[in-house]
Amino acid sequence: MIIVKNVVKKFKMGSIESTVLKGIDFTVPKGQFLAITGRSGSGKSTLLYQLGLLDHPTEGSIIINDEVVTNLYGSKRIEFRRKNLGYIFQDYAILPTLTAKENVILPMMMGDNQKNDIKQRAKDALGKVGLEKQINNLPSQLSGGEQQRVGIARAIAHNPSIIFADEPTANLDTESSKVVLDIFLKLNSEGQTIIMVTHEPEYAKLADRIIEISDGRIVSDKNISNKY
């Protein structure tokens, strides 16, 4: 499903250039739950942003579903991202003036979905994360864990090929984190491909596979599950 070849990412500030990713190579099969770990500043979130088409690598190529996505720019890149990828962020990234249902519906309105269809898909997605009774609540009426579940519902409502999660439990307490990870495990058991960045070793161990990044390079790549 994902092929990463010699991905390099450089950032430049004035005359100073830093290389954050230094030749990353790996593949991810369909249906795998991959955890990317590493210390702060190791490059793990930068890598996720390249994989998720939220940034563009300086060198190398990324292939998703047989499409060389590093060759996509502008509207084609946006369209591929909208149709194929889902995102979950550590700060929830939901709009405070919209209800849970409206937050899930909003991204789908950018496509060619029918109005009644996206309402039902939003409702179904919120049901999958256990928020069927809170669909009309504003974020201020939800706990942090519930807000993150709205973020998950938004990510899965359009049935993406891959879900990217960047430190999804960073702002949550232990119990809320467990609920979120249980949702990931259930989605993965249903065939959902998930790539999650986390600095928590115990959470990473729930995945099928752990890639550890240090100083912009892969230093460890371990299969935890025997599915692959």
Image (cartoon, rainbow, N blue to C red):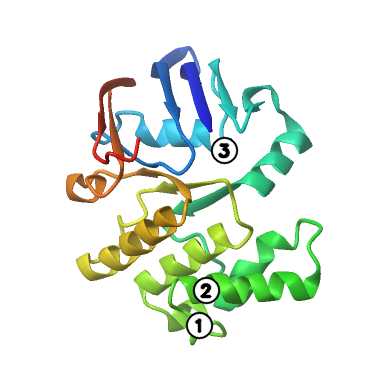
List x then y, in percent, for residue 202: 18, 49
Element type at mark 2: helix
User: In this figure, which residue is indicated by the disc labeled 3?
Assistant: 54
Q: Decide: marks 3, 1 in contact (CB < 8 A)?
A: no
Separation of residues labelled 3 and 2 (CA atoms):
25 Å
In the image, what residue occupies the spot 51% across and 33% down? Answer: 51
- The reply to whether callout 3 and callout 2 are in contact (CB within 8 Å) is no
Q: Secondary structure at mark 3?
A: loop
Near mark 1 (Cα within 10 A), the count class, few <14, some 14-19 or many ≥20, is some
Identity of the residue drawn at 37% across and 77% down: 143
**Label 2 amino acid?**
Leu
The x and y percentages for residue 12 are: 49, 19
- The picture quadrant where one finds residue 110 is bottom right
Front-most of residues 89 and 157 = 157
- Count neighbours of disc 2 (C-alpha within 10 A) and say few if under 14, some if 14 to 19, many if 20 or more: many
Kindly identify which numbered label has been placed on residue 126. Answer: 2
Q: Earlier in the sequence, mark 1 or mark 2?
A: 2
Query: Exactly how many numbered labels are in the figure?
Result: 3
**What amino acid type should be assigned to the residue bearing mark 1?**
Glu
**Mark 1 lies on residue:** 132
Q: Where's residue 24, x and y in %? A: 41, 18
Label 3 Cα crowd, 10 Å radius (few <14 / some 14-19 / many 20+): few
Residue 97 appears in the figure: no
| CA–CA distance in space, label 1 to label 2 | 6 Å
Q: Earlier in the sequence, mark 3 or mark 1?
A: 3
Residue at the left extreme, as displayed:
202
Which picture quadrant has residue 145? bottom left
